[in-house]
Amino acid sequence: MAKHHQFLNKTQQGIVRRFYDHKSGIHLTKLQELLSDLAVSDDPKAAAKLWTRVEEYLGKVGAEPAAIAKVLATKDLKALATLVGKLSP
């Protein structure tokens, strides 16, 4: 059975490889966007969904589980911003 990457041409393989090479940076950027969205969110239901996505992306960028739990328990934007700042290179 053929592997999926064999169906990609050389240019497409390079795009996929670069995505995986920069995946942590992409996830960190998405986390920063979520932080901004939370800061301007007025809808509690939408904010709850955003916090769920924040939890997902914090795990993807390698934040410590204790830090994730603390931020999610308090849902404190300032604490989240501090954590994101520590994760940024």
Image (cartoon, grey):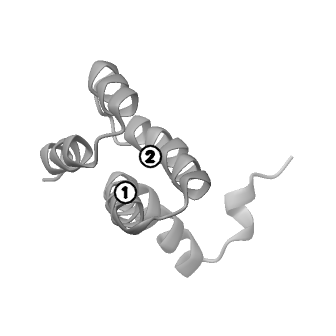
Residue 30 image point, x, y percent: 40, 61
First in sequence, mark 1 or 2: give its number. Answer: 1
Q: Which residue appears at 54% of the width and 42% of the height? A: 52
In the picture, residue 35 is in which quadrant?
A: bottom left
26 and 51: which is toward the camera:
51
Query: How many residues crowd mark 2 within 10 Å: few (<14), some (14–19), many (20+)?
Result: many
In the picture, residue 20 is in which quadrant?
A: bottom left
Residue 75 image point, x, y percent: 36, 38
In the rendered view, tell whether residue 50 sits above or below residue 86: below
Per the image, label 1 sits on a secondary structure element best described as helix
Q: Could you tell me how far apart the alpha carbons at marks 1 and 2 are, in whole angstroms?
A: 22 Å
- The residue at which mark 1 appears reads as 21
Residue 29 image point, x, y percent: 33, 63
Looking at the image, which residue sits at the far top?
Answer: 66
Query: How many residues crowd mark 1 within 10 Å: few (<14), some (14–19), many (20+)?
Result: few
- The residue at which mark 2 appears reads as 54
43 and 89: which is toward the camera:
43
In the rendered view, tell whether residue 63 sits above or below residue 13: above
Residue 11 image point, x, y percent: 54, 80
20 and 70: which is toward the camera:
70
Per the image, label 2 sits on a secondary structure element best described as helix
Label 1 or label 2, whichever lies nearer to me, is 2
Please state which amino acid type lies under the numbered disc 1.
Asp
Please state which amino acid type lies under the numbered disc 2.
Val
Q: Horizontally, is 84 left or right of 31 in the view?
A: left
